[in-house]
Amino acid sequence: MKFTIKDYIEQHNAVVGNLDHDEIENAILLIKNTIERGGRVAVCGNGGSAVAASHYITDWNKMVYAYTNVRFNGICLSDNVGLITAYANDLSYDDVFSEQVKNLLNKDDLLITLSGSGNSENVVKATIVAKSMSVKTLTICGYDGGKLKQLSDNSVWIRSMDMQLCEDAHTVFGHMVMKNLCGSDIVA
């Protein structure tokens, strides 16, 4: 099928329109509860998902405090290139997030993983380690949900087999969380 802008927009709208509202509301409540308990929210992903994870933490850290005066203790495990390459070089790329989970997260924290396929080994391993530490887990995943949908305590499943549409929905989710945490009148 030949790409057309009209078709892409229609597919995008269908994917976003098909997001499960209950899954999103549960995810937002989990994030809110973590912050209210004084816990940390850590996010990670690969490629476009790493960029979306960084975008989440940028928006949530800045905007939540700016609009509510509530501190948002968020980190992106994908952001520290030195640490990622050190773990990849000394251990394995599969360990770049799980090793950070071991060092940076505690029982009252939340690990959010982003993956179009739901099968990225390093985020799967981070989820397994987090669960072994009693860290709550949430995945934002596409395709059939992959291993992450099965392993995670909670999920927002993007019902699409198209990576770019999954990544679009990642961004939409992050903005919905920010607007909810800050209040509906936010326009910044």
Image: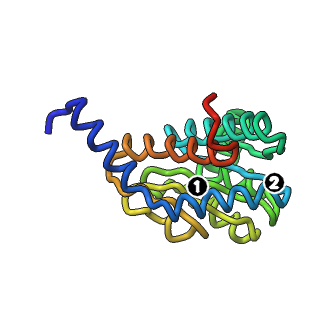
**Side (left or right) of 72 relative to 13:** right
| Viewer can see residue 148 | no
* Element on which disc 1 rests: helix
Amino acid marked by disc 1: Val
Q: Residue at x 14, y 39 (%)?
A: 1
Vertical position of residue 104 compared to residue 11: above or below: below
Residue 20 percent location from the top left of the image: 45, 61
Question: For the C terminus, which image quadrant?
Answer: top right
State the mark number for residue 103: 2
Residue nearer the viewer, 97 or 68: 68
Which residue is the site of mark 1? 123
Q: Residue at x 78, y 54 (%)?
A: 35
Residue nearer the viewer, 175 or 41: 175
Vertical position of residue 42 compared to residue 5: above or below: below
Q: Residues within 10 Å of mark 2 (few under 14, many from 20)?
A: few
Residue 121 percent location from the top left of the image: 53, 56
Q: Quadrant of residue 107?
A: bottom right
